[in-house]
Image: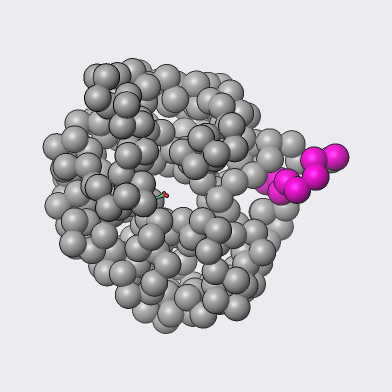
Amino acid sequence: MNTRKKVIAGNWKMNKTSAEGVALAQEIVAAVGKQGAVEVVVCPPFTAIESVGRVLEGSEVRLGAQNLHAEASGAFTGEVSAPMLRAIFATHVILGHSERRTLFGETDEGVNRKTLAALKHQLRPIVCVGETLAEREAGTTLKVVQTQLERGLEGVSREQAASVIVAYEPVWAIGTGKVATTEQAQEVHAFIRGLLVKLFGDAMAQRIRILYGGSMKPANAPELLAQKDIDGGLIGGASLEARSFLELVAAAAK
Ligand code: PEP
């Protein structure tokens, strides 16, 4: 039995106006705002992040962003920096999500710069890795995940590693309703844990949370969350309604 606190993080993507986000956050805080057994995080779009943050004030629910720019400030039109996120009390940031990699050209090197910036400014990076369907079918899943993880975490010190959260998100399972089998997920999670041992030593690797993401729903969550190396979920679709999100929090609390 490990002592890692489970994490349930909602990635709202480009959904919810500020008012809609506030309403959803109010429901979440009312139901789980005081519990501390599970680390609950919501990641609204930038336009809703400050108003949602106000709803979370005084609760145990944490505020996350979906991206950041690696520089602290400057001429980067359309971008948001780590210090700006800290100033509105964000604590987490999703980095290297597959949608950012495939739709916005993010590279492992870019994810690495952002990860280092997040850590420098005391934000917990949720670093996403995962293979496409073609890569899985070609038998290169572990290689792809290894490259993304090692490059993404380059230069992260052992001390900083305690703040890192990894999310394994098979691209073919995101928003498709196709969930990885528990065996497929656990195999990759255990592999990631092994890589973390090599990077940061066994004691630290046993502390780092590795989340599964990809069509996690209340129906499939209990089995996934019971796996030895699955420490929570990064949730897209099911995080957009309080009921399903709260059921996932409850599943993680068991
Ligand atoms: C995600 O985008 O991080 C995700 C896991 O999405 P979904 O739960 O909708 O598959």
- Asked which quadrant contains residue 169, the reply is top left
Residue found 22% across the figure and 42% down from its top:
180
Residue 172: in sight, yes or no? yes
Q: In which quarter of the image is the N terminus?
A: top left
Residue found 14% across the figure and 37% down from its top:
183
Answer with left or right where residue 10 lies relative to residue 6.
Answer: right
Residue found 51% across the figure and 56% down from its top:
13
Residue 195: in sight, yes or no? no
- Asked which quadrant contains residue 117, the reply is top right
Q: Where is residue 153 in the image (x, y as percent from the top left)?
A: 50, 26
Residue 112 versus residue 147 in the image, above or below? below
Q: In which quarter of the image is the C terminus?
A: bottom left
Which residue is more in the foreground, 184 or 85? 184
- Asked which quadrant contains residue 91, the reply is bottom right
Residue 254 versus residue 186 in the image, above or below? below
Which residue is more in the foreground, 184 or 172? 172
Q: Where is residue 44 in the image (x, y as percent from the top left)?
A: 55, 62
Q: Where is residue 247 in the image (x, y as percent from the top left)?
A: 27, 69
Residue found 72% across the figure and 52% down from its top:
84
Residue 186 belongs to magenta span: no
Magenta-drawn segment:
75-82
Residue 46 versus residue 138 in the image, above or below? below
